[in-house]
Amino acid sequence: VQLQASGGGLVQAGASLRPSCAAPGRTFSGYFTAWFRQAPGKEREFVAAIKWSDVSTYYADSVTGRFTISRDNAKNTVSLQMNSLKPEDTAVYYCAADRGMNSESVTQSGHYDYWGQGTLVTVSS
């Protein structure tokens, strides 16, 4: 499954962005789809995930209440609505997908086999 992430950009603190993840020619049905991010000099970290079948969602504590992950059946995309952005949200955001996750493995990047190329989000203070 090839994933394509888009929708990053440069914004000021407090603004919003909505990156999206698509799987051209494939469906996310049956998959968990997640967003991870990696800031310069830091390890990749979990941001949010969604289970396509029942729309269960999972969030990192650092984004709970500010970010919302959602799916669009018609467009076969998964989006990450990011509100109240902070400078510490600056990172390359990657989407990932795989099957057979549980509430523990869904947050762990090593459990995902399919990754997008990343989209840069820069939040200025």
Image (spheres, rainbow, N blue to C red):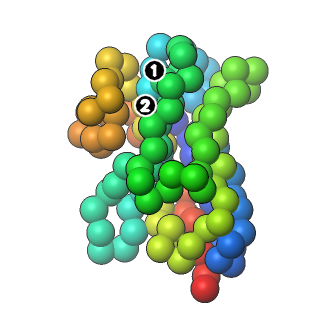
What amino acid is at disc 1? Tyr
Q: Which mark is residue 58?
A: none
Mark 1 is surrounded, within 10 Å at the Cα level, by few (under 14), some (14 to 19) or many (20 or more) other residues, namely some
**Quarter of the rendering containing residue 9:** bottom right
SS for dot 2: strand
Q: Are marks 1 and 2 in contact (CB under 8 Å)?
A: yes
Place residue 122 in its image quadrant.
Answer: bottom right
Earlier-in-chain disc, 1 versus 2: 1
Name which residue lies at 64% across and 29% down. Answer: 71
Q: Is residue 76 left or right of residue 106?
A: right
- Residue type at mark 2? Ala
Q: Residue furthest right?
A: 74
45 or 20: nearer the viewer: 45
- Tell me the CA gap for discs 1 and 2: 6 Å
- Which residue is label 1 attached to? 31
Q: Is residue 12 left or right of residue 31?
A: right
> Is residue 104 visible in this depiction of the protein?
yes
**Mark identifier at residue 97:** 2
Counting from the top left corner in percent of width and height, residue 54 is at: 54, 16
Q: Is residue 101 left or right of residue 9?
A: left
Q: Nearer the viewer, residue 85 or 77?
A: 85
Identity of the residue drawn at 27% across and 33% down: 104
* Image point (44%, 59%), residue name: 62
Q: Is residue 118 visible?
A: no
